[in-house]
Amino acid sequence: MSNKAPLLGLDHGSWFQAFRGIVRSTDERTLLTSGLPVSGVGNSSPIVSYENARAIASALVLANMNSIPLDWAARLSVGGVNMNFFIVKQLPVLPPEAYLKERSTGRPYVHLIVPRVLELTYTSEEMAGFAADLGFDGPPFHWDDQRRHCLRCELDAIFAQMYGLARADLEWILDAEPPSSSFPSLKQNEMQAFGEYRTQRYVLQAFDTLERGQVPDLSG
């Protein structure tokens, strides 16, 4: 059975990428993007498609769109409750060539990002097609909340470096001083759950590690 949409001329194989078209001020993040097994979705889950290097491109853009630096820009761009395509198209998503650059670790950013995205995404056999398209033939990764949080914070730090942010810039994005606010729901939820703004500490720790020329491993 083909997964091709005849009217659109798109063939999504066994998976596709979509973002949530509805935003709420009470959510921890604004731009929520995910890889999904082929299934029916409504108009509140716009699909993102790629013409070339589909799996790699999807993994890189997925990580970029879910990163704290880009989410901060998205928060400043949305004036209502809809994450419309015209907003997404204007967000500062990094160009393909940015992922081939090396900065402090001596490794291209693509080599740091794709394995983390694979582990975060491939937690069910339903996404085996995505894993296979990335060249991985192992079993799904175990869902571990702590490790997943560490991987996401490492990606946040990687993208902060890719955007050329200084540490002070990243500190502001994570927790702007009053009367401004960056991620109030995220901070409030973590203060209640852990007694600290854990994401801030982890992201800054990973960022400092990158700036020293080392690959961050928060769960190691």
Image: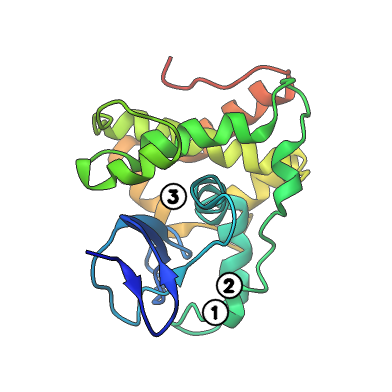
Report which residue position mark 3 lands on: 187
Q: Is residue 67 above or below residue 195?
A: below
Give the class, few, some or many, for how many residues have Cα within 10 Å of label 3's Cα (few <14, many ≥20): some
| Quadrant location, the C terminus | top left
Please state which amino acid type lies under the numbered disc 2.
Val
What label sits on residue 85 in the rendered view?
A: 1
Mark 2 and mark 1 residues within 8 Å of each other at the beta carbon: yes
Question: 203 or 120: which is nearer to us?
Answer: 120
| Front of the two marks 3 and 1 | 1
Under circle 2, the secondary element is helix
Q: Residue at x 70, y 50 (%)?
A: 96
Residue 175 shows up from this direction: no
Q: Position of residue 85 (x, y in %)?
A: 54, 79
> Where residue 199 appears, x then y in whole percent?
47, 39
Work out whether residue 152 or residue 18 is closer to the camera in this orientation and state it: 18
Q: Secondary structure at mark 3?
A: helix
Q: Name the disc covering residue 7, or none.
A: none
Quadrant of the rendering where the N terminus is positioned: bottom left
Q: Are marks 3 and 1 in contact (CB under 8 Å)?
A: no
Q: CA distance from mark 3 to mark 1?
A: 28 Å
